[in-house]
Amino acid sequence: MVFLVVLLTALVAVVCCQTALETNLATSATSSELIDPEFGVGVSGTLVNTSSSLLRLTAIPGVCDGTKQLVCASCTTLRVCLGTVPGQDLTVTCPTDQPYCNFGTTSDRCSADPIPDVCSDPTQNVPVTCSAVGKLPDASNCRIYHGCLAIGESSSIYTCPAGYVFHPGLELCALENLFARCTRLQCSANFLGHVRYGNSLRFYGFCDGTGQTPIVFKCPNRANFAFIAGTTFGECVYACPAQGNFPNTNDPATYFQCFWANRRLRYNVIRCPAGTTFNATLRICT
């Protein structure tokens, strides 16, 4: 009897969790308004795109493999291949009348047209691959945000009302003003590492060294992003509330296992067995 009660509780929690997540992403502006004395009222955006066929790619190979004389090194630069050994190449910037690098069959080339879905105009509002569950800002367009139901899936796009921008503190659209400014992430050529999303303690981007649009990540609840001293990289630092197991709001299939060690609360990130998710009520995977 006790086993049946526990099982029913777990099933109800799983269903409620999924329903709450979908409701949180698709709720109306009225029910999701969040009032902050400094930032004003935050409102939900309007769902405009759920297509996975427009998924924005996140990498240009840029490798001299012996098959092409010229290869795209980034959205705006060409690599002249002088061999297949690293270092035996020369990188040049495309001219202003043909500012984009584009793929070719036997050789890449400079072009007036960007590579589709890779170096496209950010105002085209292209879905991204979800790096976390919940809401993510767009790296290039501050007037939209992405809704994600699962890691690795294509995002749904929500557009903010006119005059509003995505605010990372509210995780909603906020009236653009001194406290809610338009934020965009940009990667300089050859930079490899993380960049902070404005002044946010949760959102940040990763630059892969090609100068392309960074991939946006976010820290889970109770975690802040911090740079590692002496490097261009950072990490999310989780603050354990107590000893025990606690949900990872970025990924329902993992959880934080907090424990005391050397008089300090420390943690491990634990992945649930295949086919299960962490149950925040029972604090186990079900």
Image: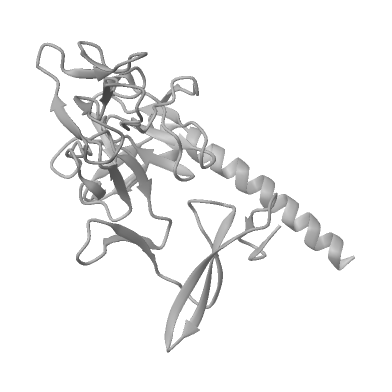
Q: Residue furthest bottom?
A: 263
Nearest the eye: 193 or 226: 193
Nearest the eye: 284 or 94: 94
Q: Which residue sits at x=27%, y=32%?
A: 83
Decide: is 182 above or below 5: above
Decide: is 126 above or below 7: above
Residue 206 at x, y = what percent? 30, 46
Q: Residue furthest right?
A: 1
Q: Quadrant of residue 187?
A: top left
Quarter containing the N terminus = bottom right
Q: Quadrant of residue 265?
A: bottom left
Decide: is 109 above or below 1: above
Residue 90 visible in the displayed image:
yes
209 sits to left or right of 250: left
Q: Which residue sits at x=80%, y=58%?
A: 7
Decide: is 106 above or below 65: above
Residue 168 visible in the displayed image:
no
Residue 70 at x, y = what percent? 25, 22
Nearest the eye: 92 or 277: 92
